[in-house]
Image: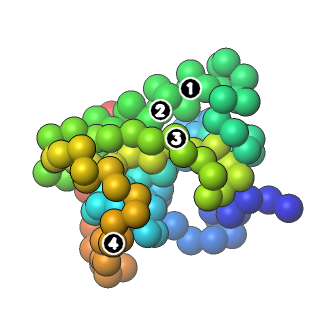
Amino acid sequence: MASIFSRIIAGEIPCYKVAEDDKNFAFLDINPVAPGHVLVVPKKEVDYIYDLDEDDYVSLELFAAKVARAIVKAIPCKRVGSATIGLEVPHAHIHLIPINKESDMNFFSEKAKLSEAEMQHIADSIAEQIQ
C-alpha cells in the first residue's frame, strides 16, 4: 500500500505544496512544530532515507537546501533546523523547521495551531521564494 506521502504526491490527499521537481516534493506539515514546518520527500517511495541510492539522496538534500533558503526568506527565523527522524511515516523525509533557538526543534512540544488560510499563506510565501 502506498504511504500517505505517496498519496499526497499523487494528489489523492490534499496538501499545502511548497515546491516540486522531477524527483522531490515539499509541503507543509499539518502538525507543525512551528509555522513554516516543511516536509521534504523523494517521490520514490523508500522507507529509510539512508536506503536511497546516492543520486536520489543527493538530489533530496539539494532540494531541501533550496526549500530551506526559501523558508528563511519567507518566515522570520534565525535558521532552519533539519531533522531526519523518519519513524512516523514509512517514506523517507526531512523535516525543515524555522528556528530561533535550539529548543524550537522540540517535536514533543505543543504543535502550532494554524487555520487553513494561515497554512495556505505560509505555503504560498515559501513557494514564492523558491529559486
Q: Nearer the viewer, residue 111 or 124?
A: 111
Spatial separation of the CA atoms under disc 2 and disc 4: 28 Å
Residue at the image point whose x is 85% and y is 62% from the top: 1
Neighbourhood count class around disc 2 (C-alpha, 10 Å): few under 14, some 14–19, many 20 upward = many
Query: Which mark lies nearer to you, 3 or 1?
Result: 3
CB under 8 Å between discs 2 and 1: yes
Vertical placement of residue 58 versus 63, above or below:
above
Residue at the image point whose x is 22% and y is 39% from the top: 79
Residue at the image point whose x is 61% and y is 58% from the top: 88
Q: Is residue 121 left or right of residue 61?
A: left
CB under 8 Å between discs 4 and 1: no
Residue 130 visible, this angle: no
Spatial separation of the CA atoms under disc 4 and disc 1: 32 Å
Q: Which residue is mark 2?
A: 63
Provide residue 34's location: percent of width, then percent of height. Answer: 29, 61
Q: Nearer the viewer, residue 50 or 12?
A: 50
Q: Which residue is mark 3?
A: 84
Q: Which residue is mark 4?
A: 110
Spatial separation of the CA atoms under disc 2 and disc 3: 14 Å
Residue type at numbered disc 4: Glu
Residue 90 visible, this angle: yes
Neighbourhood count class around disc 4 (C-alpha, 10 Å): few under 14, some 14–19, many 20 upward = few
Residue at the image point whose x is 33% and y is 34% from the top: 131
Residue type at numbered disc 3: Thr
Q: Residue furthest top?
A: 54
Secondary element under disc 1, as helix, strand or loop, is helix
Q: Earlier in the sequence, mark 4 or mark 1?
A: 1
Q: Which residue is mark 1?
A: 59
Q: Earlier in the sequence, mark 2 or mark 4?
A: 2
Provide residue 116's location: percent of width, then percent of height. Answer: 36, 79
